[in-house]
Amino acid sequence: MDVFETRFNTSEDTLSGVYEELIGAGLNDLDPFTDSSEAVTAWKDGAYEPRIIHNIADIRRTRALMELAERYCSKSDFSMKSLEPIV
């Protein structure tokens, strides 16, 4: 969340916090958990549907923030990381 802290001067450091500060609560209201640690507990308890909804909400929040950042930040402010396994 460094790009958002430095470029948008946010006070939050979580995905849902930054999203709410910059965009609004919209997708946060869809998330069945108030904290990601609750999603871990749900997974361990076998409650998969709320976990899937949480993951989708995270993906949609991330996408919304990235679209916002693409409009206002230079590409040089971002660093890409490879998801390929290290051999």
Image: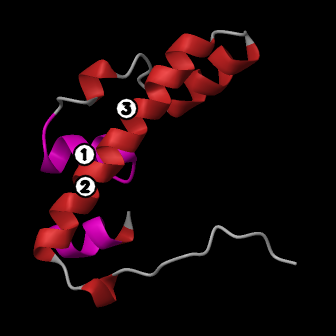
Q: In terms of secondary structure, where does tag 2 sit?
A: helix
The residue located at (48%, 78%) in the rendering is: 80
Q: CA distance from mark 1 to mark 3?
A: 11 Å
The residue where tag 2 is placed is 65
Q: Is residue 14 magenta?
A: yes
Badge 1 local density, few (<14 within 10 Å), some, or many (20+)?
Answer: many
The residue where tag 3 is placed is 57
Three-letter code for the amino acid on which mark 2 is drawn? Leu
Earlier-in-chain disc, 2 versus 3: 3
Occupied quadrant, residue 3: bottom left
Q: Magenta segment, which residues?
A: 3-24
Badge 3 local density, few (<14 within 10 Å), some, or many (20+)?
Answer: many
The residue located at (81%, 76%) in the rendering is: 86
Mark 1 vs mark 3: in front = 3
CB of mark 2 within 8 Å of CB of mark 1? yes
Q: Quadrant of the C terminus?
A: bottom right
Three-letter code for the amino acid on which mark 1 is drawn? Tyr
Q: Nearer the viewer, residue 87 or 74?
A: 87
Q: Is residue 71 left or right of residue 31?
A: left
Q: Is residue 73 above or below residue 21?
A: below
Q: CA distance from mark 2 to mark 3?
A: 12 Å
Give the number of marks: 3
Q: Main secondary structure of the magenta part?
A: helix
